[in-house]
């Protein structure tokens, strides 16, 4: 997203659309000594009423029919969500102002892809896309240290895998053990070790979460093309729908573990303390729940493949 300094319109690189801007805010004499443009922006978005679940359902249906005003209301009502998420990435390479702007791009992506029939709240769905947009911007900002974007993403996965194995093994894992978990060949270890040394000598662009992000459940190690994002959106929608019908404790574990519902990923220990369970029991529940998700997604793919085969056979 670009928010222009001297324009009264915001260019989302989509249809003409305007939200309260940050950089273009012109300070009036009465407020110049007390409020910055960012503070004025935050004050403005806080004046917008939040939406109920019923509001979200109705707006999503209208948006699907091309109602621009419905899209406007959905976006404006969730700008505070973007700010809350962006604050969690402050100090990692981009200013809060830039993080908010990038997060707003993710919000627009979520507004366009939200399926009200799934039964989940919009904030749950949108949080994923907002975080992905911010993370991608942080990765791109790290290119100045001569590490390709795909390698920065891989190093983020490496840190999380290392933290997970440390928690499970009770000791620091060897590089070979981490590589095995990530499915990386041994011949790549020297390259990764060198990248880690370079990366650690520069400001990091992504926090070393002890838990996983939902993105790691459904994305591979390369940057996604538009076709990949369409597939990812479809899988994300299915996952959120399955969580709504899953055993409540299993769903809670996965939501906390993967950082859903606008929360950061939690460790097994943190989840156990919250639910009154041992760390090992939480791990078992997580494994069982992930297995159910995997089975459900695989069954859906197989059904779609059979249907496509029948349609192809009938066309012949």
Image (cartoon, grey):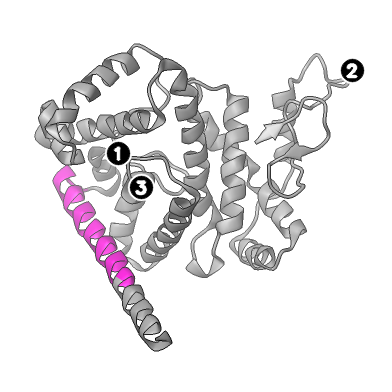
Residue designated by label 1: 211
In the rendered structure, does residue 286 fall within the stretch colored magenta? yes
The answer to which quarter of the image holds residue 7 is top right
Q: Nearer the viewer, mark 1 or mark 3?
A: 3
Q: Is residue 41 above or below residue 79?
A: above
- Depth check, mark 1 against mark 2: the one in front is 1
Quarter occupied by the N terminus: top right
Q: Secondary structure at mark 2?
A: loop
Quadrant of residue 311 within the rendered picture: bottom left
Q: Is residue 173 visible?
A: no
- Position of 158 with respect to 51 (left or right) is left
Residue 97 coordinates in the image, percent (x, y): 63, 26
Expressed as whole percent of the image width and height from the top left, the position of residue 209 reads 33, 32
Mark identifier at residue 31: none
> SS class of the residue under badge 3?
loop
Front-most of residues 185 and 72: 185
Seen from this angle, which residue lies furthest top?
Answer: 201
Task: Tell which tag, 2 or 3, sits nearer the viewer.
Answer: 3
- Magenta region: 277-301
Q: Residue at x 88, y 21 (%)?
A: 28
Q: Position of residue 67 (x, y in %)?
A: 74, 63
Crowding around mark 1 (Cα neighbors within 10 Å: few <14, some 14 to 19, many 20+) is some
Residue ID for mark 2: 29
Q: Which residue is mark 3?
A: 219
């Amino acid at each position: 997203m670009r928010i222009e300094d001297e324009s009264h319109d915001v260019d989302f690189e989509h249809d003409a659309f305007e939200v309260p801007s940050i950089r273009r805010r012109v300070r009036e004499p009465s407020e110049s000594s007390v409020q910055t443009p960012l503070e004025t922006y935050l004050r403005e978005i806080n004046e917008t009423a939040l939406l109920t679940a019923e509001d979200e359902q109705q707006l999503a249906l209208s948006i699907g029919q091309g109602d621009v005003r419905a899209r406007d209301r959905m976006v404006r009502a969730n700008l505070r969500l973007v700010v809350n998420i962006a604050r969690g990435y402050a100090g990692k390479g981009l200013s809060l102002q830039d993080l908010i702007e990038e997060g707003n791009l993710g919000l627009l992506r979520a507004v366009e892809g939200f399926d009200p029939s799934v039964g989940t709240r919009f904030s749950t769905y949108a949080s994923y896309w907002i975080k992905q947009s911010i993370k991608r911007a942080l990765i791109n900002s790290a290119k100045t240290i001569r590490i390709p974007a795909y390698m920065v993403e891989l190093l983020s996965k490496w840190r999380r895998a290392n933290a997970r194995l440390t928690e499970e093994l009770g000791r620091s894992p060897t590089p070979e053990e981490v590589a095995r978990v990530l499915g990386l060949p041994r011949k790549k270890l020297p390259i990764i070790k060198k990248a880690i040394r370079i990366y650690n000598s520069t400001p990091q662009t992504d926090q070393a979460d002890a838990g996983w992000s939902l993105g790691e459940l459904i994305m591979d190690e390369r940057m996604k093309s538009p076709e990949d994002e369409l597939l990812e959106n479809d899988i994300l929608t299915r996952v959120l729908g399955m969580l709504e019908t899953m055993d409540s404790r299993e769903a809670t574990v996965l939501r906390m573990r993967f950082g859903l519902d606008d929360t950061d990923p939690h460790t097994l220990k943190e989840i156990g303390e919250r639910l009154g369970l041992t760390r090992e029991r939480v791990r078992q529940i997580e494994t069982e729940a992930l297995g159910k998700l995997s089975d459900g997604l695989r069954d859906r793919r197989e059904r779609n493949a059979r249907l496509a085969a029948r349609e192809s056979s009938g066309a012949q």
